[in-house]
Amino acid sequence: MNFLEARIAKDGIVKEGNVLKVDSFLNHQMDIALLDQMAAEFHQRFSNKPITKVLTIEASGIAIACSVARCFGVPMVFAKKTKSINLDGDMYVAEVDSFTHKKKNTVIVSKKFLSPDDHVLIIDDFLANGCALQGLISIVESAEATVEGCGIAIEKGFQDGGWRIRNLGYHVESLAIIESMDASTGAITFREQEA
């Protein structure tokens, strides 16, 4: 069991509807030392790639992506879910279905922050159905930039998002892949991964 799987087993809470609550350490209250450890692991897994930008989606991916961007020494960009008055100029836009919030979001990134010269590492906290990841990939492709890989903290391996994204030919690295969860017992089974 790796460090993230151990933390999920200790502090994660399984809820009905295939929901895993990790809000005590990852996406509400954040364990900064854990985020830095995750970032170092992503840096090691993608160190052979010429990363120039780290991209995520608001809000839960931002903290992880910041730590990852610091490791690579590159800027972090996040796709916004709402257009505000301080966003100006042309935008890349994608429609994303949210598993967690059960709604469709339009996400946007200013064109001035992604260019064809960029080599992008996409980072997110969860991968379930793959909709957020597909939206971010489409934004990178709209910019004619290169998707160098996708780093995911927690993948729900029993849902088809990881399979779908890998099948499209993208390099996906998940720090923890959950094979199954049982809300009645709280049991979480992790997929065996190569060390």
Image (cartoon, rainbow, N blue to C red):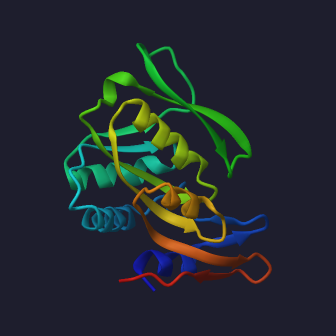
Q: Give percent across and percent down for residue 146.
A: 32, 42
- Say if 87 sits above or below 5 in the image: above
Q: Quadrant of the C terminus?
A: bottom left
- Say if 194 sits above or below 101 in the image: below
Q: Give percent across and percent down for residue 129.
A: 64, 56
Q: Residue furthest front?
A: 168
Q: Give percent across and percent down for residue 65.
A: 37, 50
Q: Residue drawn 49% across and 38% down?
A: 138
Q: Quadrant of residue 127?
A: bottom right
Observer-nearest residue: 142 or 5?
Answer: 142
Q: Residue drawn 27% across and 38% down?
A: 118
Count of all numbered marks drawn on residues in the image: 0
- Say if 152 sits above or below 56 in the image: below
Q: Residue drawn 54% across and 81% down?
A: 191
Q: Residue drawn 52% across and 56% down?
A: 165
Task: Answer with left or right where residue 13 lies relative to residue 16.
Answer: left
Observer-nearest residue: 32 or 177?
Answer: 177
Residue 156 at least partly seen: yes
